[in-house]
Image (tube, rainbow, N blue to C red):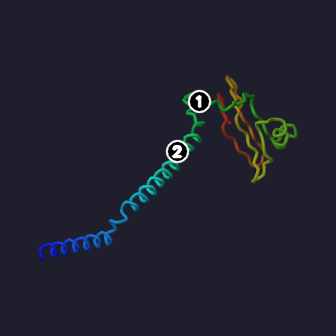
Amino acid sequence: MVGTRSQTQYNSLKYCTSYFSYITGEINMKKFSKKKVKVIVVCIILVFSIFISMNFNYFQDNSNLEIDDERELKVSGFKEIGPVYIDDKDPANNWLITAATYDWCTGSGTIGNSYVIKDIKITLSGSSENCMTIKNSQKYFLVFNCSFLGSGI
């Protein structure tokens, strides 16, 4: 009887262990683990390859950028000229003639396309003359990026 009881207990224990293994998935754990590890490794390789590819493209695109360490001021290209005289009542010195003759004067004198005088330098020393005189004009005009030395406008 002793042997039978032990055999019965052994069979019961074996059955319980098998049932427990079935419930917890321990029977297919080796197959499941191998599949899971393969999937995880493939995903990691895929993610890292995409990440490395993106970083490589980033560095390739930015490789042409250079930092210019020159600290010199750029000269705006002033043209040194004599005094400017514009008189719309004088046919030889009106806006139309001035804009057609000189490249530093552009525009047509309208509200949408004003005459623009720019990038000139006028230096008068010891003269009572003005650097720029504009009279008898009802045209729209702008004067910017100009330098007047020695006298007024």
* Residue 69 placement, left or right of 136: left
Q: Position of residue 41 (x, y in %)?
A: 45, 53
Relative depth, front residue between 66 and 121 = 66
How far apart are labels 2 and 1 at the CA level?
Answer: 36 Å
Q: Quadrant of residue 33?
A: bottom left
Q: Alpha-carbon neighbours of circle 2 within 10 Å: few (<14), some, or many (≥20)?
A: few
Q: Position of residue 57 (x, y in %)?
A: 57, 44
- Rendered image: mark on residue 55: 2
User: At label 1, which amino acid type do we have?
Assistant: Leu
User: 53 above or below 1?
Assistant: above
Residue occupying the far left of the picture: 2
**What residue sits right under mark 1 in the picture?**
73
Label 2 SS: helix
Which residue is drawn at the image coordinates 67% and 40% (left, top)?
A: 144
Residue occupying the far top of the picture: 126
Closer to the eye: label 2 or 1: 2
Work out whether mark 2 precedes mark 1 in sequence or the reverse, and give the earlier one.
2
Q: Quadrant of residue 4?
A: bottom left
